[in-house]
């Protein structure tokens, strides 16, 4: 059985690998290679998203023999746009689609392990990072969990 962090990162990948054609952005992230685990210096396709693990912080649980914790992940999503406003708006729309996808089932189908999740998001102009013509959505996903062994 994999570590809980691996289970969650793979579940995030599955959940956000969706077709958002009818969503806020109109983008499709369901194709092969559209969502990857690992940091991207430059996106291989646009739109796309990458997921990285940040950390896990644990504490004693509500009862002896249980642990509680919060895992944090970062999703970087890349969109296009012909000007700064369009890039930021496209990135915000994709961030909203991804956030809605994640929060539609806040246990991500891992009932009994995942207690809840929270998504924070922002959008940046990719040109500030030498990524010409791109908008970047950054999402921090905080996943709270409880288990017997703390891993």
Image: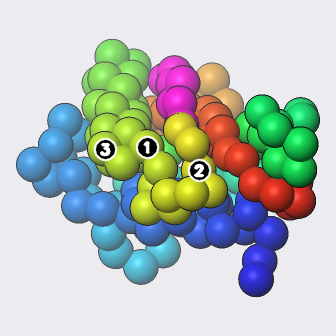
Cα–Cα gap, marks 3 and 1: 6 Å
Q: Which residue is drawn at 43% across and 61% down?
A: 109
Looking at the rendered structure, which numbered label has been put on residue 1? none
Residue where numbered disc 3 is placed:
104
Q: Residue 86: give x, y in percent of width and height.
A: 29, 24
Label 3: how many residues lie within 10 Å, few (<14), some (14-19) or many (20+)?
A: few
Q: Where is residue 90 in the image (x, y as percent from the top left)?
A: 31, 32
The residue at the far top in this view is 85
Residue range of the region highlighted in magenta in the rendering: 117-123
Mark earlier in primary sequence (1, 2): 1
Is residue 28 positioned above or below 78 on the image?
below
Q: Are marks 1 and 2 in contact (CB under 8 Å)?
A: yes
Cβ–Cβ under 8 Å for marks 3 and 2: no
Classified by dominant secondary structure, the portion drawn in magenta counts as strand
Nearest to viewer (mark 3 / mark 2): 2
The residue beneath circle 1 is: 106
Residue at which label 2 appears = 114
Above/below status of 4 relative to 83: below
Which of the 4 image quarters holds residue 54?
Answer: top right
The quadrant in which the N terminus is found is bottom right
């Amino acid at each position: 059985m994999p570590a809980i962090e691996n289970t969650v990162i793979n579940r995030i990948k599955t959940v956000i690998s969706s077709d958002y054609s009818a969503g806020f952005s109109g983008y499709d992230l369901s194709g092969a290679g559209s969502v990857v685990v690992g940091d991207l210096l430059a996106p291989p396709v646009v739109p796309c998203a990458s997921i990285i693990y940040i950390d896990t912080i644990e504490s004693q649980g509500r009862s002896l023999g249980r642990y509680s914790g919060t895992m944090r992940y970062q999703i970087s999503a890349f969109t296009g746009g012909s000007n700064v406003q369009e890039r930021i708006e496209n990135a915000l729309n994709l961030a909203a689609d991804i956030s809605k996808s994640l929060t539609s089932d806040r246990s991500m189908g891992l009932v009994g392990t995942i207690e809840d999740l929270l998504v924070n998001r922002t959008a940046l102009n990719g040109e500030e990072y030498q990524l010409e013509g791109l908008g970047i959505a950054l999402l921090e996903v905080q996943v709270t969990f409880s288990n017997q062994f703390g891993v």
